[in-house]
Amino acid sequence: MDTNTLWAEYKAQPNTLLKKKIILSYTNLVHYVIHHSKFATMNIFDDRDYFQFGIEGLNEAVDRFDPDFGTKFETYAIQRIRGKIIDELRKAQIKPRILSREDSNQVQYSNVSLNQPINQEDGSMLYEVLPADVETPDFETEKIEAKEKLIEAIKNLNERDRMIITLYYFEHLSYKEIADVLDISVSRISQIHSKIIENLKSMLGDLND
């Protein structure tokens, strides 16, 4: 039975068996979200936990999906799956090893580009926080040194600020999505982000002295 038929039958007469069949048909979306995000590198949960959270998000997506809104189920489900995993990370106090100050070997920021916008919402670029003399490094050694300084500064932010930087620049969440995770307003996230950037600039200036 194809997914269109499953959906038609489920909408006509919802039941547990059909719902399970629909969920099984879309488990690839759970794997997609996990493997295309940095959740696994956080090491706060194991792969089975992430998969279970993803299935719970998929289950919620099936319950709440309304095809009349014109959104593809796959698009909606990916958002719900991702949101569920992030919510579980928040409940666990968001203390993933990716953000740990104590173990620099676990920091996963090294692949970030310093001179390209990572998040298009406000055009912010991480290189903008670097001191002027290394803002657009031309040589490989300067790029490496600039990244090391940036990583060190991020590691020394408080927990909330490290989380916002990670979710915004490395998980590519919007201000709205981060606001939902932290249960505060979008405008407050924008204010905090601006303050974080100023703090990073100050830290990097001190590191550069």
Image (tube, rainbow, N blue to C red):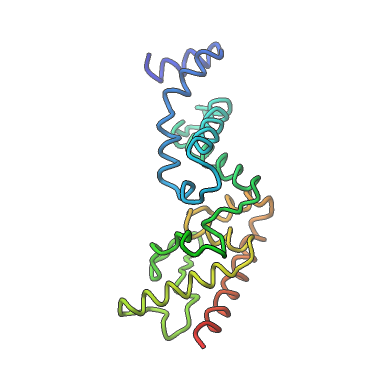
Left or right placement of residue 161 versus residue 46 in this view: right
What residue is at 53 percent from the left and 12 percent from the top? 12
Q: Is residue 147 above or below residue 16?
A: below
Q: Is residue 44 above or below residue 117?
A: above
Percent of width and height locating residue 52: 53, 32
Q: In this rendered view, identify the residue nearer to me: 202 or 61.
A: 202
What residue is at 42 percent from the left and 36 percent from the top? 31
Left or right placement of residue 188 versus residue 14 in this view: right
What residue is at 42 percent from the left and 65 percent from the top? 117
Percent of width and height locating residue 11: 53, 16
What residue is at 57 percent from the left and 78 percent from the top? 203
Percent of width and height locating residue 152: 51, 72
Q: Is residue 203 above or below residue 99?
A: below
Left or right placement of residue 33 versus residue 138 in this view: right
Res 120 seen here: no
* Residue 53, quarter of picture: top right
